[in-house]
Image: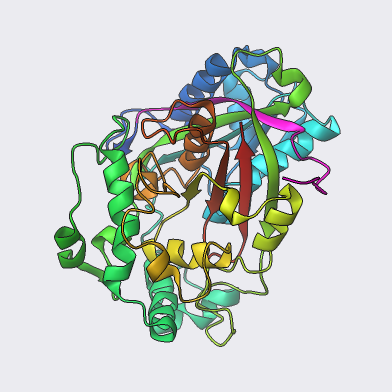
Amino acid sequence: MGDSPWPLSDKACIVGIGESQYWKHGGATESAFRLACRAILAACEDAGLKQQEIDGLVGYIRERTGIEKLAAGFGIRNLRFANSWSGGGGGVAAVAMNAAMAVASGAANYVVCYRAICQGQQPRLGQARPDPVAADSDAFSWPWGLLSPAQGMALKVRRYMYETGTTREDFAPIALACYAHAQRNRRAIMYGHPLTLEQYLDSRVIVDPLHLFDCCLESDGAVAFIVTTAERARALKQTPVYMMSAVQGSDMRSEHVASPNMPNFASSNFRTIAPELWARAGITAKDVDTAQIYETFVPLVLMALEDFGFCARGEGKDFVKGTRLFWPDGDLPLNTSGGNLAEAYIHGLELVNEAVRQMRGTSTCQVTGAEISLVVGGPGSHLLSAMLLRR
């Protein structure tokens, strides 16, 4: 695989994962705070750590269970590192990267990354909720009725389809793979609800060209994982999963609906930082055994596969044909727990836990001999991240 130029390569590990039960939005019987505590306690038990040993917390944007509240309620007596991501779903890998930098620098010993969502108890993330004043980039979209994430992304998808000749049917294998994998995962909200091509194509329109099964679930639940150094990981319960490489940042991009004249508008926005991910790890896309790619909207996964070099621009529709993305026979099984589409939408952080399970060999759709997993956060967003995990 070559020598890695990234100073943190293999120096930080994920050593514990946990989650609450997952529900459709409105189904949770406890608060987001209690669910966050349950997920973190499960991660501590998984790692073989006492909760008092946790000394760092990394949260997400819009996290109702704030770090200060969680630290006090969870009983962290000496919080040495506190950090929050500001870019929404683009931060799936960034929170892990921030935790890795903390433990590698000695700022903390054991850092928890977490996300708790109760969309039945708080505003739904996909719902349009304009403020009285449209500030910053919203001034370019809200006055014209572009209020929700689906509305903004629909413009990008339609432009992509026009430029590449891609059709709705070309996106179908992504959704079908996620739903197929969820049928083996009892945690998944869509367990017991398989999806057919006919159902995918005939589903109701959300925002043209996005239909119902192009859009992620709206869920209640919580996810957590614990990051520490490779040295400390050796004394813990689980076999550590190493961070080979991670990136966060952006191509030159403003908010997704405010830059339709940018040449990269109809893309996942990863074209500048994806090559850096591979360079830091000393590998290429061909070395990846399984991919966990954030899919709030199915077409953005196709764009991400192109930007990460699995295929050339416009060739995504051919790359995903057939069973390539399906476990057990595909050469790039995608979102093997069901992903945002069919397991749960915990702002994508559940994808990290599934990547860890794949590297441990414990996934419900375990890829035989899997050694490297790609995790991609928020394709199409204005701030992004990705990482490579290895066993």
**Residue 232 place in picture, x, y as percent:** 75, 19
Q: Residue furthest bottom?
A: 261
In the figure, residue 309 lies in which quadrant? bottom right
Rendered view: 79 above or below 327:
above
Task: Using the rendered image of the protein, determine whether residue 345 is visible from the camera's viewpoint.
Answer: yes
**What secondary structure do most residues of the magenta stretch adopt?**
loop
**Residue 6 place in picture, x, y as percent:** 80, 47
Residue 355 shown in magenta: no
Q: Is residue 251 left or right of residue 331?
A: right
Rendered view: 69 above or below 272:
above
Write the residue at 54% across / 14% down: 45
Task: Using the rendered image of the protein, determine whether residue 24 is visible from the camera's viewpoint.
Answer: no
Write the residue at 34% across / 48% down: 326
**Residue 78 place in picture, x, y as percent:** 75, 21
In the figure, residue 261 lies in which quadrant? bottom right
Which quadrant would the C terminus be assigned to in this image?
top right
**Residue 34 place in picture, x, y as percent:** 45, 26
Which quadrant would the N terminus be assigned to in this image?
top right
Write the residue at 61% across / 58% down: 384
Return the residue nearer the eye: 289 or 383: 289
Q: Is residue 80 left or right of residue 283?
A: right
Residue 4 shown in magenta: yes
Rendered view: 157 above or below 181:
below
Q: Is residue 56 left or right of residue 379?
A: right
Which residues fall within the magenta stretch?
1-21
